[in-house]
């Protein structure tokens, strides 16, 4: 690991650990990081700060990919542990997660706002003490009326959503890669279109 304080970007993907959750809607943040890692030859080979971590260079920028292993509701613990240990800046972080209010296949970038009912984001806000941090929300759409949210987010994507899901993961990787070299405002302008 490079010495503390050197410039790097860190991307946190939210999800739940364990194979039973791997393909669920709540884990699209993990899916995006896995794809980004695969595209850039990065392996998740470190386990620390309550996370599995992969580091490498993406488009010339030193980047750390972080998947908290705390389960979704405690994601902030992993973020805080990483921040405190490596003395990294919050403005160099991007959080990637599933969003019920965004249509499946679409992504929305934001740099502040409430948790909007997302427990992972709620936990991060609690632990970092601010709602201002960069995020990429990956759409999972809302369930049909009468379908409990908790059951919905922990269920797998149906086959018909396979293509939009795949495209969304690739678009998320493009947005993340673009954001490493451009301002978040520029990234939002390009990918929120």
Image (tube, rainbow, N blue to C red):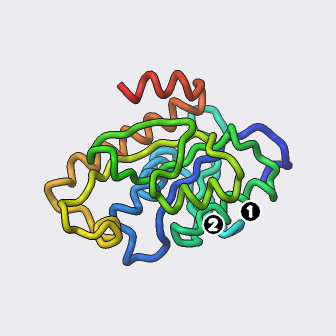
Mark 1 is surrounded, within 10 Å at the Cα level, by few (under 14), some (14 to 19) or many (20 or more) other residues, namely some
Please tell me in which quadrant of the rendered image residue 158 appears. bottom left
Q: At 80% across and 57% down in the image, what residue appears?
A: 84
Q: Is 44 left or right of 127, judged from the image as shown?
A: left
Foreground mark, 1 or 2, reads 1
Give x and y (percent) for residue 79. 67, 58
Q: Is 20 left or right of 135, judged from the image as shown?
A: left
Q: Which residue is mark 2?
A: 51
For marks 1 and 2 on the same chain, the one whose residue lies earlier in the sequence: 2
Q: Is residue 150 above or below residue 83?
A: below
Q: Nearer the viewer, residue 37 or 20?
A: 20
Residue lying farthest left? 160
Q: Is 155 left or right of 10, judged from the image as shown?
A: left
Q: At 34% across and 52% down in the image, what residue appears?
A: 100
Please tell me in which quadrant of the rendered image residue 179 appears. top right
The tag on residue 81 is 1
């Amino acid at each position: 690991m490079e010495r503390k304080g050197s410039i790097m970007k860190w991307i946190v993907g939210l999800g739940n650990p364990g194979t039973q959750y791997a393909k669920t809607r709540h884990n699209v943040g993990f899916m995006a990081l896995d794809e980004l890692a695969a595209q850039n030859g990065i392996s998740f080979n470190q386990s620390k700060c309550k996370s599995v971590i992969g580091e490498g260079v993406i488009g010339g920028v030193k980047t750390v990919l972080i998947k908290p292993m705390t389960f979704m509701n405690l994601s902030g613990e992993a973020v805080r542990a990483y921040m405190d240990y490596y003395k990294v800046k919050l403005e160099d972080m991007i959080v990637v997660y599933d969003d019920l209010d965004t249509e499946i296949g679409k992504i929305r970038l934001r740099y502040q706002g409430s948790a909007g009912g997302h427990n992972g984001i709620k936990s991060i806000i609690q632990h970092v003490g601010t709602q201002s941090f960069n995020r990429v929300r990956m759409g999972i759409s809302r369930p049909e009326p009468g379908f409990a949210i908790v059951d919905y987010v922990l269920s797998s994507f149906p086959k018909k959503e396979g293509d939009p899901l795949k495209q969304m993961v690739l678009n998320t990787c493009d947005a993340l890669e673009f954001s490493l070299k451009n301002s978040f405002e520029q990234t939002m302008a390009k990918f929120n279109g």
